[in-house]
Structure formats: C-alpha cells, structure tokens
Amino acid sequence: MKYLLLVASCFCVAYCANTMCWTVDQIADQILLETDHNKDGVLQMSELTDEILTWGVNNASCLTFHAFTTYWVAHYHDHHDTAHRFFSNLDQNGDEHLCLLDIAVQIVTYDNHPTDGQVQPAEFKAFLHAVHPDSHQNGGHGHGCQ
Ligand SMILES: [Ca+2]
Ligand SMILES: [Ca+2]
C-alpha cells in the first residue's frame, strides 16, 4: 500500500503543480468551504481574517514565509516551490512577511462584483487566479520524483 501511494504521489509530482492535482478553482473552493464560517456562501472580511489568524500569524498579525508555506502545502497541497512563488506574489514589499492587512488590501481590490464589502466566490476566484503562480494551467510542469 505504501508503495502504491508513493507511485501515485510521484505520478502527481510529474504531471501536476499540486500533489493532489487540485486546480486553482478547487483550491479556491476548499478555502471558501473552510472560511465561510456562517455558511452564507459569501466571505465576510472578518471571516477571512479569523481564518488567516489560525494559519500561524505572529504577534504582529503577520505570517512568515515559513508559516505560510507550511500551512499552504499541508492544506492545499501545492508543491513547496509553487507555495513559495505564491507567497512571493502576495508579499508585495518583499519583506518575507505577509500581514493580515496586506492580504485584505489585495482581496478588497476584487470586491467589485458587486462592491459590497464582502467577497463573493467569483471575486475570490478572480483574486486567486490573479496571484497564484499556476493559475493558467491545470496540468503542468513536472518536477520529477524526489
Ligand atoms: Ca460568510
Ligand atoms: Ca463583493
């Protein structure tokens, strides 16, 4: 069984940017599922910040590169280097820290469908497609078995 899992995971490593072969839309759906705490189908900003607070923020309400990538790889199954590039895209000032405000400011720019101070699923997907490094390919580049 272990051998079979190893083979399956190697197959994924070779053919997907994500170890579970999740697309960016599937990652977005999973985040929406976990973050929409009141289950109204829309992300309120307070839900987003509450969720990100559980990802391992430090005293300054910021995620370090390590905290972010550890959480992201474990929960959303991207390869580490994909998570690294994703973090770099989000970390606009390049200080290796991603603070709640930095994330909120970026997501808010996609609050336009409608502009209501909340994040509809389509808005969240537009945001993720814009910042995720593998947003334009669902299969993709191989990294080989390690
Ligand atoms: Ca909600
Ligand atoms: Ca909105």
Image: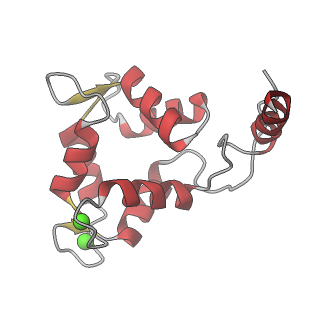
Q: Number of labelled discs? A: 0
Q: Is residue 72 above or below residue 113?
A: above
Q: Tell me the residue at 48%/40% (across/down).
A: 75
Q: Position of residue 89 (x, y in %)?
A: 43, 39
**Which quarter of the figure has residue 111?**
bottom left
Q: Tell me the residue at 21%/39% (across/down).
A: 100
Find the residue positioned furthest to the front.
1
Q: Position of residue 62 (x, y in %)?
A: 23, 29
Q: Tell me the residue at 45%/49% (across/down).
A: 131
Q: Position of residue 11 (x, y in %)?
A: 83, 39
Q: Between 95 and 15, which is closer to the camera in this rendering?
A: 15
- What colour scheme does the image use? secondary structure
Q: Tell me the residue at 81%/33% (across/down).
A: 10
Q: Position of residue 53 (x, y in %)?
A: 23, 37
Q: Between 126 and 44, which is closer to the camera in this rendering?
A: 44
Task: Locate the N terminus and report the quarter of the image it occupies.
Answer: top right
Find the residue positioned furthest to the bottom.
114
Task: Locate the C terminus and report the quarter of the image it occupies.
Answer: top right
**Which quarter of the figure has residue 99?**
top left
Q: Is residue 42 above or below residue 51?
A: below
- Can you tell me which quadrant of the image ligand 1 is in? bottom left
Q: Is 144 placed left or right of 77 in the picture?
A: right
